[in-house]
Image (cartoon, grey):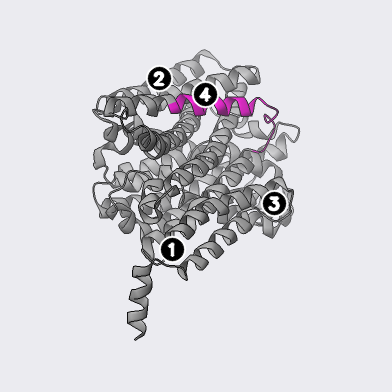
């Protein structure tokens, strides 16, 4: 579907030009690899919040939420609801210990805690999990671009991947953070307008009740309690285990800035899912034969005035591309810091590290394009996101919490083993076709390994325990 007029195009170009200007300004502030990945540790609360939200509030929370709501209703809220809860935990419990570590990446922190191959294993498995979410963003972009421009799916996917590379390759965190501020102001304005339009178009609460039965459409557990609770839990452990969000904590200028930024994100993220749900329900009622992934962009094209629709479409495009770019940046930082610098120390100067960071962004974005075009164009966007969060959570969550709150109490080999066994168990569980969500067995394997390690501490820690007992 494509109905773009001159008014659409003018407002799209104007909006993209504004965001591009912010990105160019941010790119001028990069003078080193540290600036590229951490913004020089100068980020205030608003930039921390924008960095988190610029990645979390994107294709999954808009286009993906509307797609799932088109099929199941309110249970599509779990993505932004779970993300908000995770940011609350991040701000209240983890901001202080994370920022005080003075690390650049989450695998680096795990490597210091458990030694050996811990950082490399965490980087590899976390990058795989983050990559799955990158696939979700490309799928969102395909739905948007095919609605806007009537492009074939392969061309839309290629354009999406190219935009993601261009978005972040010359801006790093300053790009995702500062552009995130501009994007979020536009996005939340559009969400407010479209949410109100969809709600009134449905006839308000009475119209909703008259159109849809209570279950599954108005239940948070509309896809089944096990499925939807696992979705919410995967967001909680996944956000706490993702380099992009942890990196926002590391980039803050102080503990207070990190905490306030995470709490602002926790307050603002959950409402972002509600307009997508309303739009999904509206399009289900009025256009039941529509491709679900196109519910959000089709609503914008059909029911907003052309100038405002152009702003909305451009904002959605920046949201989707910005989220994908932030995820690619997170993978790039982990691979560069925890693998490249570890094994190529002689060649890993500042300029070379910056080059490798950008090359990794190009490589992982290109690979996501291949996955999308390999028979996955019709898949659910949020399913990729939930799987991604679960794999990252199984890899990092429990070892990270142990490293932050129980340092020295877990035998280092057990910590390393937990980082490997957790995701491997989750992957094997998924491949084996078991019905339960793979997050649970993955976390259980990680927990049991860490618990065993608590009784196999190093001699110094064991001696300390014996002294306390006597």
The mark found on residue 217 in the picture is 3
Return the residue nearer the eye: 215 or 196.
215
Residue identified by numbered label 2? 14
Mark 4 Cα within 10 Å, few/some/many (few <14, many 20+)?
A: many
Q: Quadrant of the C terminus?
A: bottom left
SS for callout 2: helix
Q: In terms of secondary structure, what is the magenta stretch mainly?
A: helix
Task: Give me the C-alpha separation between circle 4 and circle 1.
Answer: 42 Å
User: Residue 54 appears at what percent x and percent y?
Assistant: 42, 38
Return the residue nearer the eye: 364 or 465.
465
Q: Earlier in the sequence, mark 1 or mark 3?
A: 3
Task: Give me the C-alpha separation between circle 3 and circle 2.
Answer: 38 Å
The mark found on residue 161 in the picture is 4
Q: Earlier in the sequence, mark 2 or mark 1?
A: 2
Up/down of 245 relative to 145, above or below: below
User: Residue 255 appears at what percent x and percent y?
Assistant: 27, 54
Magenta range is 360-380
Q: Earlier in the sequence, mark 2 or mark 4?
A: 2
**Membership of 404 in magenta stretch:** no
SS for callout 3: helix
């Amino acid at each position: 579907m494509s109905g773009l007029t001159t008014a659409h195009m003018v407002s799209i170009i104007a909006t993209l030009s504004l965001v591009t200007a912010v990105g160019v300004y941010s790119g001028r502030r990069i003078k080193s690899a540290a600036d590229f990945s951490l913004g020089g540790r100068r980020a205030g609360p608003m930039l921390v919040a924008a960095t988190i939200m610029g990645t979390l509030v994107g294709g999954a929370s808009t286009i993906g939420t509307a797609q799932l709501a088109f099929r199941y209703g309110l249970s599509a809220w779990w993505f932004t609801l779970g993300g908000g809860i995770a940011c609350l935990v991040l701000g209240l419990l983890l901001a202080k210990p994370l920022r005080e570590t003075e690390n650049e990446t989450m695998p680096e922190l795990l490597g210091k805690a458990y030694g050996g191959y811990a950082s490399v294993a965490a980087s590899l498995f976390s990058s795989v999990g983050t990559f799955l979410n990158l696939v979700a963003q490309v799928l969102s972009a395909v739905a948007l671009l095919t609605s806007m421009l009537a492009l074939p799916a392969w061309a839309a996917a290629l354009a999406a991947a190219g935009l993601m590379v261009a978005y972040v390759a010359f801006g790093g965190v300053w790009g995702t953070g500062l552009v995130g501020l501009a994007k979020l102001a536009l996005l939340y304005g559009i969400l407010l307008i479209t949410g109100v339009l969809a709600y009134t178009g449905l006839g308000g609460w009475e119209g909703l009740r008259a159109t849809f039965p209570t279950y599954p459409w108005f239940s948070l557990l509309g896809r089944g309690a096990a499925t939807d609770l696992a979705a919410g839990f995967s967001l909680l452990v996944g956000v706490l285990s993702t380099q992009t969000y942890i990196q926002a904590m590391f980039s803050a200028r102080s503990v207070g800035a990190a905490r306030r930024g995470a709490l602002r994100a926790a307050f603002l993220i959950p409402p972002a899912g509600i307009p997508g749900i309303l739009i999904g329900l509206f399009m289900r009622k009025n256009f039941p034969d529509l491709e679900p992934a196109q519910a959000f962009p089709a609503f914008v094209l059909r029911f907003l005035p052309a100038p405002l629709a152009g702003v909305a479409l451009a904002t959605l495009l920046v949201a989707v591309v910005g989220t994908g770019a932030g995820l690619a940046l997170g993978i790039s930082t982990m691979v560069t810091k925890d693998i490249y610098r570890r094994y190529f120390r002689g060649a890993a100067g500042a300029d070379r590290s910056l080059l490798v960071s950008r090359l990794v962004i190009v490589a992982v974005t290109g690979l996501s394009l291949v996955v999308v075009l390999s028979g996955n164009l019709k898949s659910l966007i949020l399913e990729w996101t939930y799987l991604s969060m679960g794999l990252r959570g199984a890899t990092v969550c429990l070892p990270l919490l142990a490293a932050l709150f129980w340092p020295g109490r877990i035998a280092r080999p057990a910590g390393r083993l937990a980082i490997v066994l957790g995701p491997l168990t989750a992957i094997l569980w998924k491949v084996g076709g078991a019905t339960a969500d793979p997050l649970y067995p993955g976390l259980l394997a990680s927990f049991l390994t860490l618990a065993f390690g608590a009784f196999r501490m190093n001699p110094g820690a064991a001696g300390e325990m014996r002294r306390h007992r006597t």
